Image (cartoon, rainbow, N blue to C red):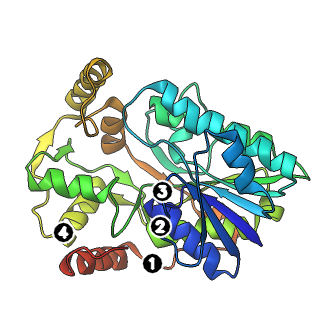
C-alpha cells in the first residue's frame, strides 16, 4: 500500500513510519519538519491546513494519523485546532480523495475520568469526562474518526499507553531530569500499578492495526506491553538506566492533586517555558492504577509485544551508555 503517516517527526511517529515501511509499504510522512525516516517521502505541512492535508492524502491507500498537540498545559483553542479540527479535516479530505483506510492513534486518557483502571478494555471515548485539554480533544477526535467508519472508509483507533524508549522526551527525559535535580516525587508510596509500552511494541501494534483495519474497523484498542509495574518500579528502572538515583521524595496524592490544580490556574495566567511541574491530571496518573486487559487487542490485531519491559530498560541503559546517539 501507499501509506501516509502524519506526525512522523516524533518518537512514536517515526517508529510507526519505519514499521510500516518494514512491512513493505510505500511511506509518505506529513509534519512540520523533516521526519528523518529513511526511504520515506516527506511532505511538510500542518494538519490544520486543509490544502496541505488534501495534497498529502492524494493517491494514498491508507493513513496512520499521529499528528497531535500533546501537552499537560496550554490554550484549549490550540488543542482544538490540531487535535479536533485537524482530524476532522483529515477525514474529510480522505473521503474526497477516496482513501479507504485510517488508523487513528489515540490515547487511553480519552476514557479516563480520574479513577483507577484495573484490567479494563477500551472503554468508549468520553470528551465530557476526560481530564485536561489534551485528553478531551483527543476523545472528541477519536469520536470523529470512528464515527466516520463505513464500508468506504474503514477506521480503527489505537490507544498506546505511556510510550517510552531511547530518545523519548515526553516521559523518559522528564523523569531523568527531575530525578537528577531532586524534583521527582513519588505520590503516596508509588504503589499504583500501571501499564506502559516500549516504543517498538507501540509502533508494531499500530502497524498491525493498519494491516487488520478491514477486519476490525469501527473498534478502539488499547496497546500496552501487558506487564503492569508499580509507578516506583517503572520510575526506578528508567532512572537506573540513565544512571541517576531513583526518587525518594514522598508526597501525599491529595496534596499533589491540590497543588496541581493551583499550578494549572497559575499556568493559565502566566505559562512557563516547559511543562508545569504538576497538574491534577498528572497527579491522578501517578497515584491511581491504570492497567488494561490485552486479550482482545492481541487477538483482533494478531499482534503481541516483542520487547519485554526488562529488555526495553536494557536497551535504554545501552543508549545512555553510548552517549545518547540519534534514534
**Disc 4, SS:** helix
Q: Which circle, 1 or 3, is nearer the viewer?
A: 3
**Quick one: 33 or 70, which is closer to the camera?**
33
Q: CA distance from mark 2 to mark 1?
A: 8 Å
> Mark 1 = which residue?
307
> Mark 3 = which residue?
33
Q: Are marks 2 and 1 in contact (CB under 8 Å)?
A: yes
Q: Residues within 10 Å of mark 3 (few under 14, many from 20)?
A: some
Lateral position of residue 183 relative to residue 198, left or right: left
Quadrant where the N terminus is found in the figure: bottom right
Looking at marks 1 and 3 on the same chain, the residue that comes earlier in the sequence is marked by 3
Numbered tag placed on residue 225 in the rendering: 2
Looking at marks 3 and 4 on the same chain, the residue that comes earlier in the sequence is marked by 3
Looking at marks 4 and 1 on the same chain, the residue that comes earlier in the sequence is marked by 4
> Mark 4 = which residue?
242
Q: CA distance from mark 3 to mark 4?
A: 28 Å
Q: CA distance from mark 4 to mark 2?
A: 21 Å
**Quick one: 312 or 226, which is closer to the camera?**
312
Amino acid at each position: 500500500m501507499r501509506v501516509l503517516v502524519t506526525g512522523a517527526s516524533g518518537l512514536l511517529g517515526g517508529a510507526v513510519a519505519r514499521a510500516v515501511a518494514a512491512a513493505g509499504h510505500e511511506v509518505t510522512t506529513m509534519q512540520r519538519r523533516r521526519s528523518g525516516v529513511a526511504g520515506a517521502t516527506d511532505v511538510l505541512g500542518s494538519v490544520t491546513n486543509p490544502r496541505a492535508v488534501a495534497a498529502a492524502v492524494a493517491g494514498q491507500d491508507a493513513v496512520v494519523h499521529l499528528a497531535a498537540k500533546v501537552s499537560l498545559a496550554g490554550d484549549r483553542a490550540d488543542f482544538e485546532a490540531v487535535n479536533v479540527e485537524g482530524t476532522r479535516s483529515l477525514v474529510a479530505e480522505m473521503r474526497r480523495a477516496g482513501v479507504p483506510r485510517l488508523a487513528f492513534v489515540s490515547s487511553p486518557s480519552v476514557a479516563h475520568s480520574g479513577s483507577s483502571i484495573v484490567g479494563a478494555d477500551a472503554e468508549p471515548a468520553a470528551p465530557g469526562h476526560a481530564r485536561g485539554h489534551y485528553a478531551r480533544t483527543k476523545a472528541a477526535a477519536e469520536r470523529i474518526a470512528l464515527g466516520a467508519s463505513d464500508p468506504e472508509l474503514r477506521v480503527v483507533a489505537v490507544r498506546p499507553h505511556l510510550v517510552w524508549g531511547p530518545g523519548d522526551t515526553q516521559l523518559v527525559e522528564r523523569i531523568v531530569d527531575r530525578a537528577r535535580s531532586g524534583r521527582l516525587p513519588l505520590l503516596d508510596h508509588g504503589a499504583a500499578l500501571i501499564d506502559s509500552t516500549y516504543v517498538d511494541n507501540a509502533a508494531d501494534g499500530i502497524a498491525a492495526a493498519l494491516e487488520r483495519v478491514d477486519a476490525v474497523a469501527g473498534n478502539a484498542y488499547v496497546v500496552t506491553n501487558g506487564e503492569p509495574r508499580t509507578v516506583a518500579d517503572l520510575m526506578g528502572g528508567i532512572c537506573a538506566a540513565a544512571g541517576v538515583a531513583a526518587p525518594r521524595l514522598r508526597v501525599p496524592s491529595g496534596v499533589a492533586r491540590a497543588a496541581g490544580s493551583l499550578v494549572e490556574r497559575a499556568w493559565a495566567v502566566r505559562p512557563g517555558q516547559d511543562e508545569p511541574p504538576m497538574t491534577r491530571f498528572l497527579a491522578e496518573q501517578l497515584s491511581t492504577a491504570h492497567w488494561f486487559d490485552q486479550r482482545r487487542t492481541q487477538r483482533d490485531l494478531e499482534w503481541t509485544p516483542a520487547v519485554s519491559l526488562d529488555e526495553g530498560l536494557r536497551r535504554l541503559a545501552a543508549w545512555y551508555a553510548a552517549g545518547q546517539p540519534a534514534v
